[in-house]
Image (tube, rainbow, N blue to C red):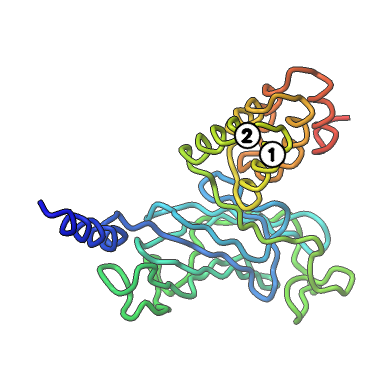
C-alpha cells in the first residue's frame, strides 16, 4: 500500500481519536461570594487547606459524592455531603452556597461541552443552565452536619466575616492533577537515568510542581535516589502533593535511617 496513503490515513484517525474515545467529564466547584471550603470527592481529598475554587478533570461520568467542610463563623465547622452527577463530555460547574439560618446547598450553574457539539454535548459547546438529574439545578441530597452555629456574622462582601476581613486568609486553589500509573513509572525511569543527584531532584520537583501522586508512588520515587539527603528533601517538598495524606506514613518506608524519618516528620508536622 502506498506509504503516502498510509500516512494520510494515520493522520485522519489521529484527528478523529478524541471523538472516538470514551468521553470523560470535568467538574469545577466554587464558593458563593468567596465562601471557603475543603473538598473530598469520592473519599479523595482535593484541597490543601481552604479553597474558594476547585477544578477536577478526567473524571468518570455518572454519580459522585462530594464532601465539603466549611469553617463556621465562631469556631467549629459545618460538614455537608452532596451527590454530584457528571455528564460525559461536559465540564459541569457547581456553586456552593450557605446562607444564615440555612443548611449548605450545592447548585449546578452550568455545563460546557469539552469536545464541541455532538452526542451528549449542548449545541454550540455553550453553557446549559438546566436543572440536572436532581431537579431545579440544585443538589442537596446528602444532608449536612452542623459543627458550629450560624449567626449574623455573615457579611455582604463574600463569606463569613473574620475580624472584619470578609475572607479566610491562607486559602488556596487546588489545581494539582493526579499522575497516572504509567506517568509515575516514566518519571521514576527518567530520574534513574540522570547522572547527577541534583539533576534527579530538579527533575522530580519539576514533574510534581503541578501534579499529585499517592504516598506509595512517592515512596517508590524516593528509592530512585542514591542519597538519603535527596530523599529527605523531596519528601518534604512532595508532602503537599500527596493526594492521600492519611497514608503518608508509607513514605517513611523509602528511607534507610530513622533520623531521616524524624526530620521529615518535624518538617510536615507529623512528629516532635
Say few, some or many: other residues with alpha carbon within 10 Å of mark 2 (under 14 / 14 to 19 / 20 or more): some
Residue closer to the observer: 96 or 103: 96
Residue 267 lies, in percent from the top left, at 83, 37
User: Residue 101: which quarter of the image?
Assistant: bottom right
Question: Disc 2, disc 1: CB below 8 Å?
Answer: yes
Q: Earlier in the sequence, mark 2 or mark 1?
A: 2
Callout count = 2
| Position of 211 relative to 138 (above/below) | above
Residue 44 lies, in percent from the top left, at 56, 45
Q: Residue at horizontal 89%, vertical 70%?
A: 163
Residue closer to the observer: 248 or 64: 248
Residue closer to the observer: 80 or 31: 31
User: Residue 85: which quarter of the image?
Assistant: bottom left
Residue 54 vs residue 147: left or right? Answer: left
Say few, some or many: other residues with alpha carbon within 10 Å of mark 1 (under 14 / 14 to 19 / 20 or more): few
| Position of 7 relative to 198 (above/below) | below
> Rounded to the nearest whole Å, what is the CA distance between mark 2 and mark 1?
6 Å
Residue 47 lies, in percent from the top left, at 65, 53
Residue closer to the observer: 269 or 219: 219
Q: Residue at horizontal 49%, vertical 75%?
A: 109
Residue 64 vs residue 246: left or right? Answer: left
| Marking on residue 199 | 1
Farthest left residue?
1
| Marking on residue 194 | 2
| Marking on residue 115 | none
**Local secondary structure at mark 2:** loop
Amino acid at each position: 500500500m502506498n506509504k503516502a496513503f498510509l500516512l494520510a490515513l494515520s493522520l485522519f484517525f489521529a484527528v478523529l481519536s478524541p471523538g472516538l474515545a470514551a468521553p470523560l467529564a470535568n467538574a469545577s466547584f466554587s464558593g458563593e461570594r468567596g465562601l471557603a471550603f475543603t473538598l473530598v470527592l469520592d473519599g479523595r481529598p482535593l484541597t490543601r487547606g481552604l479553597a474558594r475554587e476547585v477544578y477536577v478533570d478526567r473524571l468518570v461520568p455518572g454519580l459522585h459524592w462530594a464532601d465539603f467542610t466549611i469553617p463556621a463563623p465562631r469556631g467549629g465547622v459545618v460538614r455537608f455531603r452532596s451527590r454530584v452527577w457528571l455528564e460525559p463530555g461536559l465540564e459541569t460547574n457547581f456553586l456552593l452556597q450557605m446562607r444564615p439560618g440555612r443548611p449548605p446547598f450545592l447548585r449546578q450553574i452550568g455545563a460546557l461541552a469539552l469536545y464541541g457539539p455532538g452526542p451528549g454535548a449542548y449545541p454550540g459547546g455553550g453553557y446549559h443552565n438546566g436543572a440536572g438529574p436532581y431537579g431545579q439545578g440544585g443538589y442537596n441530597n446528602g444532608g449536612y452536619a452542623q459543627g458550629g452555629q450560624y449567626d449574623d456574622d455573615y457579611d455582604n462582601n463574600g463569606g463569613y466575616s473574620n475580624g472584619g476581613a470578609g475572607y479566610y486568609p491562607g486559602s488556596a486553589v487546588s489545581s494539582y492533577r493526579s499522575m497516572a500509573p504509567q506517568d509515575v513509572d516514566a518519571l521514576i525511569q527518567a530520574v534513574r537515568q540522570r547522572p547527577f543527584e541534583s539533576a534527579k531532584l530538579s527533575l522530580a520537583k519539576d514533574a510534581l510542581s503541578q501534579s499529585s501522586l499517592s504516598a506509595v508512588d512517592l515512596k517508590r520515587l524516593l528509592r530512585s535516589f542514591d542519597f538519603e539527603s535527596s530523599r529527605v528533601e523531596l519528601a518534604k517538598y512532595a508532602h503537599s502533593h500527596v493526594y492521600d495524606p492519611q497514608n503518608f506514613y508509607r513514605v517513611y518506608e523509602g528511607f534507610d535511617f530513622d533520623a531521616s524519618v524524624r526530620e521529615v516528620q518535624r518538617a510536615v508536622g507529623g512528629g516532635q
